Structures are given as C-alpha cells and as structure tokens.
Image (cartoon, rainbow, N blue to C red):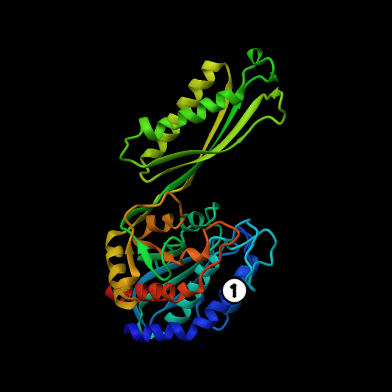
Amino acid sequence: MTPSKLKKMVRDILPDVISLRHTLHAFPEIMFEEHTTRKILMEALSDTDLKFLPAQLDTSIVALLAGDYPGANVTLRADMDALPIKDMSNNKWRSRNDGKSHACGHDGHMAILMGTIKVLMLLRDQIHGSVRFVFQPGEEGGGGGKQMVMNGLLEQEPKASAVFALHVWPDIPVGIIATMPGPMMAAADTFTVAVKGSGGHGAKPHVTVDPIVISAQIIQSLQTIPSRIVNPVDPVVVSVCSIQGGNATNVIPDSVIMKGTTRYFDNKLKKKIQTEMERIIRGICQAAGARYEFDYEEGYTPLVNDEDMVKSARNVVETYLGKDKWMEITKPSMGAEDFSYYLMKAPGAFFFLGVGEDSHKLHTSQFDFNDDAIENGILLLSAMTLETLNKS
C-alpha cells in the first residue's frame, strides 16, 4: 500500500467520518452511560461483516476484522465517555445533553477508529492476521479499560500482539503525531483524609482541637514527600484538591475532609508514597490531640510505551504522513490514561494527535475536536496496523 493510495482512501471517507463525529458530539454521555453512543456506533457498523466479540461492559463494543492471510493481532482502542461539563461552544453540533460534553475529544477518537475500520475493511486482502477494534467506556476516571483488560479482553483469541490508541492534544499543532518511548503518562491514585477534632466557638480556639489548623499543617507537610522524602530525580506529585470543613464565620468545626491525587511514573513508589502520607498525617494528628481516617485508592497505572513500537511509529508517520508530522515528546505528562493497562499486556504505543490551540483546552466548556486532524488520525492507525501485521 503506497502512501498516496492510503491517503486517497482516507479522504474518500472523510466527509462521512466528520459527520459521524458531529453526531457523537451532539449526544455526549458520561462514563458507563454511553447507551446512545453505542447505538450510534452500532448503526455505523451495521453494513460491515465484522465479527462481534464478547464485550465485558454493557456499553462497550469489541469487533474483529480477519485478514485474508494468517498472522498476529493488532488491537486498536477508542474511548467513548464524555464529561459532566456544559458545552458552551456555538457549533451546530454542540451538545444536546445539558451539562454534558465531549470536552476531552472522545467523539473524535471514536470517529477516527470508525474511519480506520472502513479503510482496513477495504484492505482485507493485504492484512496478515486480524484487527480487534475496541470502543471502550469509562475512561474518565471509571477505569473501563482496566476492567476490560483484567477481564481478558486482550487474551481472548486472537491474543493481542500489539496495541495502539491516540488522544487529542491541543498544545500540539494540527495533525502532528507525538509520542515517546518508555513512561509517557503518570499513575493517578486518589486519597481522602478526615481530620476529626473538637469544635467550638471561634473566639475560644484554646478549648478546641481545631481540625482546620491541623489540616493546614498536613497540607504543607505532605509536600515534603516529593521534595524531601522521594529521590528528587523521581517525579512525584501530591496534590490536595478539595478541603471541606465548617460553614460559619465564628464556629470551629469538628472535622475537615480533604481529597486529592498523587502522581508518579515508577510503580515502586506507590507503597512508599502511601506509607509516608499516613506517617505524616498520624504524627500531626497525634501531636494535636486529633483523630484521623485515611483512605488511599489505586487509580491508573503509569502508561509505558514500547521502545521498538515507537521507533516503528516514527517510520510510519514519516512515510505515510510526512517527516514534518512527527514529534518526539521530551518530557512525560503527569496526566493519566487507562490505556496503560493495555500496554501492560501487550507491546504498543499511545499517541498524542495535535488539534492546535484553537480547539481550546481539554476539559473546558469551549473545547471541540478539530476536524482537520481526523485525516492524520485515521492514516496513523491504519498504517500502523498494516505495517505491524505485515512485519510480524
């Protein structure tokens, strides 16, 4: 398959793919509620002869395309869920579901995967092996990818030999493909701390055990974990993102609730961070005469790209999209992605697809996927699939 022929195939289907993207954008649904989204996608797949495989989650879709020749399996994934953010854009296809929007570009991810399906179906006679297409719910904190992978998604026949996915990225120019070998995105755990003191009148703090002052000490002291306890060469973030306590100007409350997140790239740090957090919280509370409850929950694991797959991706991008469309990331992101669980089971790569600053920032009410990036997204996934399978 020459780059010019593949580009023509993609451009021929582009209007339909963009139309599908607009439809998906108009009907956003939050994690694990993607029933209408699933219906729209199934209607788009109704004229295909794909084999539908068992889907571990109610709103997911898993479909298989068998090539004309035996070989390995490449699995491609797109996330489906939207965010509980009001759509404030002025587009004709803006959200019809009040308070919900595709503010993270998952409508574009689904449309690109659907376009890839259409292209690869036409190239079945050039495929050595098979392609598994996964439309996955619940990426936005729901751990849908983790659930599906742990339930055997990639180990059911045909077992995945390689996995690929992409994500829109406004900080990168339109159509640019960016990635890096090794750790690319961080783990994301969550924690809740309840500080339980003894409240009273704001004018008599000396007869209280003030949970607000204690919480302030805890928040400050937790920052010694990345700055003084963990090796400085290991990136770690400990962020208290929510603090709730009291509702009057003259009453010291009995308790304060704090919630937040930790981020890191080395899984070996998980236990150390958790242990040190509780040591700090316990010490401060004991010194002040307060009690505490500490809950630490594992979120997403670090996303680690396979080095050889990234090298292959660079060759594919430079060959099919052009040398000016490749960017190697020099610093990983502290953001998190549950595609990390796919990469724990099979070698592969995760890509950022540039949509430019005009798309606005992710997770904001003005964000909308830039349709000009869709062509290169389809080219990337299609070419990576063909090159990977035909080399195996």
Say which residue label 1 marks: 22
Report the residue at 52% width, 65% height from top. Answer: 359
Disc 1 on helix, strand or loop?
helix
Residue 132, image x and y in percent? 44, 70
The percent coordinates of residue 217 (x first, y second) are 51, 25
Q: Is residue 311 visible?
A: yes
Dividing the picture into quadrants, the one containing residue 292 is top right
Q: Is residue 159 left or right of residue 50?
A: left
* Residue 205 placement (x, y as % from top left): 65, 16
- Residue in the picture at 45% in, 52% down: 336
**Which residue extends farthest front?**
358
Residue at the top extreme? 207
Residue 45 visible? no
Q: How many marks?
A: 1
Vertical placement of residue 99 versus 370, above or below: above
- Near mark 1 (Cα within 10 A), the count class, few <14, some 14-19 or many ≥20, is many
Q: Relative to 79, is 128 above or below?
A: below
For residue 341, side relative to residue 47 (left or right): left
> Which of 175 and 305 lies nearest the eye of the viewer?
175
Q: Nearer the viewer, residue 108 or 70?
A: 108
Q: Quadrant of the N terminus?
A: bottom left
The quarter of the picture where the C terminus appears is bottom left
